[in-house]
Image: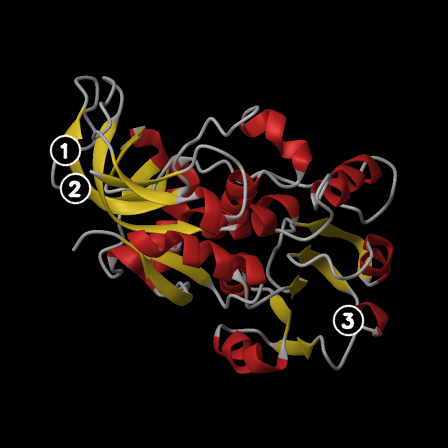
Amino acid sequence: MKAILQNRYGAPGEVLALREVEVPAIKEDQVLVRVHGAAIHPGDWMVVTGRPYLVRPMFGLPAPKKKTPGFDVAGVVEAVGSGVTELQPGDEVFGQCGGSCAEYVAVSPDRLAFKPASLSFREAAACPLSGDTALRALRDAGQVRPGKKVLINGASGGVGTFAVQIAKSMGAEVTGVCSTRNAELVRSLGADHVVDYSREDFTRGDERYDFILDNVGNRSMAACRRVVAPGGRFVPNNGTSGGRWTGTLGRTLAALVLSAVVPRQGRPFVALGNQADLLVLKELLESGKVTPVIDRVYSLAEVPDAFRYLEEGHATGKVVIAIGD
């Protein structure tokens, strides 16, 4: 099979290459998925580049343990292990795994769900990690309820486009912060109000919000907390910005410490990619309350180009990799 491989950290164009490798062998509690769609996001960028340097002990020293990028997957079950009963060959699935930028991948069934019938493989591949991140942020970290005022900074990005729609499905009054060119898109996703960050600083306004999800990190945490209503929370969820040593992890760690002592500072969270959340997301997708936004689609051979585009930080929605038919 063909797969994208990397043997060292570095710039995507220098360390990523399309190679012919063996189809992965599955364990008794795994399934083999023929991949039709994958998606990349800032976490993949960190693994490829090894930046910030602080993450390298977690990903592998001196080179990455994970040789193929990609966490999001959509495809067809090709084979199942002897201990698997919930899936069978031919099932169309989506979910999270390790190494989805390949023609086949071995996955645990508890990280998969049946693909929403209304979505193509490419659309389904755009959903798992970003959709789960948005869901956990709003439901768990923000405890969003009907009537709450929610602000999404970075509303046109991979997580942001899901967050706007999921927040609306929860009955919230949603404000999306984005660029001028993406304002209409964010409105079309259901945002009640749109703030153009090139013209207005949301942290200097008079409005107060019950929950702020910050996907950008272009305003200080103190400034963001200033516009959080009493009893509300501000939670950072940043991507590839920051210095080469700590990157956005410095902001995340600071938020974790401050959350114990500073009012309105919420605890950072982790999107776990479990099946229960996938099923909630599947229901939202099938009901039409949430629709994935795809910026660009690249082939498997074009994965280095896809990472270069992602690194620019201007993707609207998700960057998807089309694999196979």
Distance between the alpha carbons at the discs numbered 3 and 1: 50 Å
Whole-percent x, y for residue 208 in the image? 79, 66
Q: CA distance from mark 1 to mark 2?
A: 6 Å
Residue nearer the viewer, 303 or 115: 303
The residue where tag 2 is placed is: 91
Which one is nearer the viewer's eye here, 70 or 65? 65
| Amino acid beneath label 2 | Asp
Label 1: few (<14), some or many (≥20) within 10 Å?
some
Asked where in the image residue 67 lies, by quadrant, the reply is top left
* Residue type of the residue flagged with mark 3: Phe
Q: Which label sits on residue 202? A: 3
Q: Position of residue 54 (x, y in %)?
A: 68, 33
Q: Residue furthest front?
A: 14
- Residue that mark 1 sits on: 88
Provide residue 268's location: percent of width, then percent of height.
Answer: 68, 41
**Can see residue 92?**
yes
Residue drawn at the location 72% of the way across and 50% of the way down: 242
